[in-house]
Image (tube, rainbow, N blue to C red):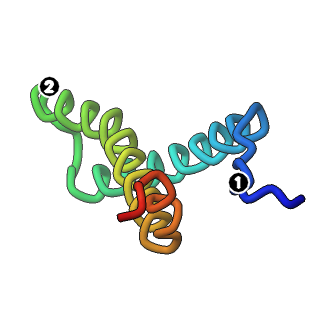
Amino acid sequence: MTDSRPAKARLGCGFLLVSAALTCVMLAINGLIVTNLVAAYSPGPLPLENQRVAQAAVFLGPVVLLFVEWWIFDVALDWLRPQRAAQGRPKA
């Protein structure tokens, strides 16, 4: 007798390690991108107010980009594999 249940995805420690490693790589790349953009748009020494804004952008920019990248990744997976979302719906 065959089992008609779909195979479960194995999401465990390996998945978490790969996700954490990928997140660290993307965060490092995002940090370089944001740092270069802030350096390109801030000529010379900055006054204290602008320096605070620049530091906030260098800190928060990579994190915001990281959320956007993971969101794009999630949307792309849902678009490429629509059956994953359809498995939980009851058949009419």
Residue 45 screen position, x and y as percent:
22, 39
The image shows residue 9 at horizontal and vertical percentages of 70, 49
Which quarter of the figure is the N terminus placed in? bottom right
Mark 2 or mark 1: which is in front? Answer: 1
Nearer the observer, 5 or 80:
5
Give the percent coordinates (x, y) of residue 72: 39, 61
Label 1 CA crowd tier, 10 Å (few <14, some 14–19, many 20+): few
Q: Is residue 30 above or below residue 63?
A: below
Which residue is at the front of the view, 9 or 34? 9
Q: Secondary structure at mark 2?
A: helix
Q: Give the total number of marks visible in the rendering.
A: 2
**Residue at 76% across / 31% down in the picture?**
13
Amino acid found under the numbered disc labelled 2: Leu
Please state if 8 lies on the left or on the right of 47 as rendered: right
Query: Quadrant location of residue 33?
Result: bottom left
CA–CA distance between discs 2 and 1? 62 Å
**28 with respect to 63 (left or right):** right
Q: Which residue is mark 1?
A: 5
Mark 2 — residue?
Answer: 48
Image quadrant in which the C terminus is located: bottom left
Q: Amino acid at mark 1?
A: Arg
Residue reaching furthest bottom?
A: 80
The spot of residue 70 in percent (x, y) is 44, 51
- Say which quarter of the image contains residue 78: bottom left
